[in-house]
Amino acid sequence: NIITFLRLILLPILYVFAVNDAYFLLLVLIFILSLTDVLDGYLARKLNIVTAFGKGFNSVVDFLFFISIAVSFYLIRPELFQN
């Protein structure tokens, strides 16, 4: 749950990087957040500390992460989201 909470706290930084045209840092943060999601799931299963709260919390943060990626890319290239 700690790793998932840290991922949640880092999500607003995606927007900061997108608004400030820090594309490389944006991609690095997306990569780091993706890796920590994989690490979180692996550790929870390996250490047998899977909880109902943790599953739900991780799912919510994953959803917010995907929405944040989409919004960040919209901020950078809005024309990609138009007809």
Image: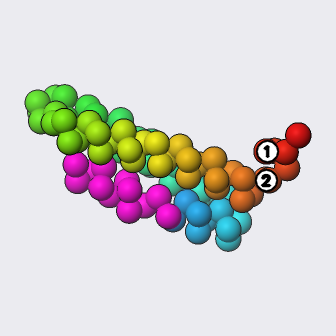
* Relative to 59, 12 lies left or right: right
Q: Main secondary structure of the magenta part?
A: helix
The residue where tag 2 is placed is 77
Please name the residue shown 72% across and 59% down the image. Answer: 75
Note whether 47 is above or below 60 in the view shown.
Answer: above
Is 17 situated above or below 66? below
Most distant residue in the left direction: 48
Q: Where does residue 43 sit, x and y in percent of width and height? A: 21, 36
> What secondary structure is found at the residue carrying circle 2?
loop
The percent coordinates of residue 26 (x first, y second) are 59, 56
Which segment did they paint magenta?
1-12
Decide: few, some or many residues near mark 2? Use Cα within 10 Å; few <14, some 14-19, many ≥20. Answer: few
**Mark 2 and mark 1: span between their CA atoms?**
8 Å
Tag 1: amino acid = Phe
Q: Nearer the viewer, mark 2 or mark 1?
A: 1
Tell me if residue 37 can be seen.
Answer: no
Q: What element carries label 1?
A: helix
The quadrant in which the C terminus is found is top right
Give the residue number, with chain letter if any, for mark 1.
81
CB within 8 Å, label 2 to label 1: yes
Would you identify the image quadrant in which residue 81 lies?
Answer: top right
